[in-house]
Image (tube, grey):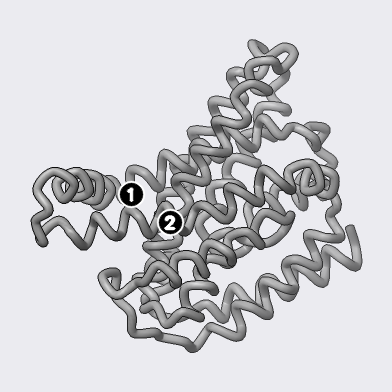
Amino acid sequence: MNIIKVIQYVFLGIIQGFTEPIPISSSGHLLIFKKLFNFDMLNDINFEIVVNFGSFLAILFLYRKEIIKIISDFFGFVKTKKDTYKENYKYAWLIVIGTIPAGIFGIILKDKIDAISNNVKLVGLALLITSLALFLIKDMKGKKEKKEITYLDALTVGLFQVIALFPGISRSGSTVVGAMTRDFKRQTAVNYSFMLYLPISVATMILGIKDLINTPNISNLFLPYMLGMITSMIVTYFSAKWFINIMKKGKLGYFSIYCLVVGILVILFL
């Protein structure tokens, strides 16, 4: 594989890493840039799985302390039933409940979603929808802390995450919007959004392992895949930290404007 191809994969790894944590759709932007620069790996779903794994590792590292605490407290409560463990025991179940809808609909709708996954005009339309949704919740502050999230809240946010199965709809955007409509505080919303990303990402990787292993000439793709994954991991880490800071300041309006402009340009020119 020549150096130009490697650079293309690294470039798309950067795009994945930057756009995954923020509410502008990573899958949509990967498709836009593939079309824009006429990259010939347009249908390389395996690469998207690999760079998504890089993003997963970054979010896992960013939230490592909280994740360890949630897991430890979950089993601590199962074993002792002490109230000190109860909050994270419940939070673990809230993550499970919030993940279920996307898991179910992802399996049911997989073929239909795959059939439209390369439609860049739909991505443009989805960005306009994302823009409107972000605009509607941009000034919301919310009151609910982590300990005040209910199971109905989790299910509602989970249903919003289902919408992100469609090309161009941001997963982080849809879950944050869902959380804000349930009166989550901004910090609570973004943290729960990233917690929901982890199991969904794992499921996506598990479902894609067979196809990845059976990819023709996989040995030739090892280097660009690995570089794309590493790039995605590094960029995701810093992009996620940036987005958390943006959420604290309540600056979602900038993303709304961005999605509006890009959505219009994509519909008109791609």
Q: Position of residue 83 (x, y in %)?
A: 11, 61
- Amino acid under disc 2: Phe
Q: Position of residue 222 (x, y in %)?
A: 60, 18
- Kindly check if marks 2 and 1 are in contact, taking CB atoms under 8 A apart as contact: yes
Question: How many residues crowd mark 2 within 10 Å: few (<14), some (14–19), many (20+)?
Answer: many
In the rendered view, does 170 fall on the left or right side of 234?
A: right
- Amino acid under disc 1: Leu
Q: Position of residue 157 (x, y in %)?
A: 51, 67
- What secondary structure is marked by label 1? helix
User: Which residue matches tag 1?
Assistant: 62
In this rendering, the answer to whether 11 lies above or below 268 is above
Q: Earlier in the sequence, mark 2 or mark 1?
A: 1
Q: CA distance from mark 2 to mark 1?
A: 10 Å
Question: How many residues crowd mark 1 within 10 Å: few (<14), some (14–19), many (20+)?
Answer: some
- Marks 2, 1: nearer the viewer: 2
Q: Where is residue 129, by image quadrant?
A: bottom right
Image quarter hosting the N terminus: top right
Q: What residue is drawn where x is 39% and y is 77%? A: 184
Q: What residue is drawn where x is 54% and y is 25%? A: 226
Label drawn at residue 45: none
Label drawn at residue 194: 2
Does residue 19 appear in this view? no
